[in-house]
Image: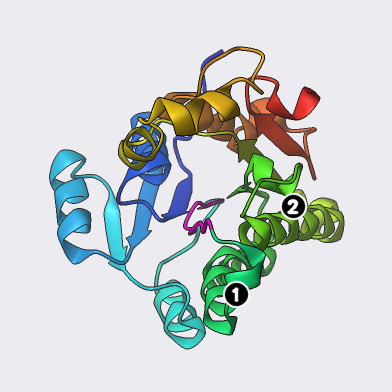
Amino acid sequence: MEINFKGKRALVTGATKGIGKDIAIQLAICGAKVVAVGRSKELLIALKKETPAIETIELDISDWKATEKALRNAGPIDLLVNNAGVGMIKSLATVTEDDVNSIFNLNVKALINVTKLVIQSMVERNVPGSVVNISSQASLVGLMEQTVYCASKGAVDAFTRAAALEYGPRNIRVNSVNPTVIMTDMGRLWWSDPKRARPMMDKIPLNRFGEVREVTDAVLYLLSDKASMVNGVSLPIDGGFTAT
């Protein structure tokens, strides 16, 4: 099933490493003009060297006003991937106000702001569009010592459904994907300890963690016209974790 984004411009947040980087590169391979957003100037330069066609924006999207200014100058966007996010493993009893603010500012507030700005432009131009939010299996199940993270991703899924309802009549689709543990560089480091990994893997019927490309492929499908009737879904990419 060939996917072609020729003539489309795509914006990807958190595009300097891991899932976001792979999505940005694969979108470019599929013909999209890609705008990659990230906080690290060095990593953006490295991404540009690897895929010269990608445009880059150095930006901390948790800064509401700076994001408004930057994205107004980013040009027309047809496809949006809200990938930027942060996790936290911490007992509820030790969670601080700063913890809650840092998680929700990036995972929820910034995602809402970026989506609002991109969709406003789509509406003004009277064009169709597609948005994919990178959520998590943590929105669908409880995970030990991840109360704040689970809450933030639950908010992402709820926002996805509401935005899909609001903008579906404009032919702007909004979906989310909900991965399990994915073997990014950071994922491999954290889950390399069998004592930590085994209890999680035992809950996955496929008996393995996911690979980055398995998330990217689902995102490309949802962004594409191949998913033209898919709107408002939260798609687990979890090997069956949430089915057990």
* Nearer to the camera, 133 or 180: 180
* Nearer to the camera, 199 or 100: 199
Asked whether, in this view, residue 17 is left or right of residue 160, the answer is left
Q: Secondary structure at mark 2?
A: helix
Q: Nearer the viewer, mark 1 or mark 2?
A: 1
Q: Visible in this render: residue 205?
A: yes
Residue 241 at what x, y percent from top left?
69, 26
What residue is drawn where x is 28% and y is 59%? 56
Query: Circle 1 is placed at which residue position?
Result: 100
What amino acid is labelled 1 in the image?
Answer: Val
Residue 32 at what x, y percent from top left?
41, 40
Q: Visible in this render: residue 4?
A: no
What residue is drawn where x is 54% and y is 74%? 99
Q: Residues within 10 Å of mark 1 (few under 14, many from 20)?
A: some
Q: Is residue 84 magenta?
A: yes
Say which label, 1 or 2, has the lower sequence index.
Answer: 1
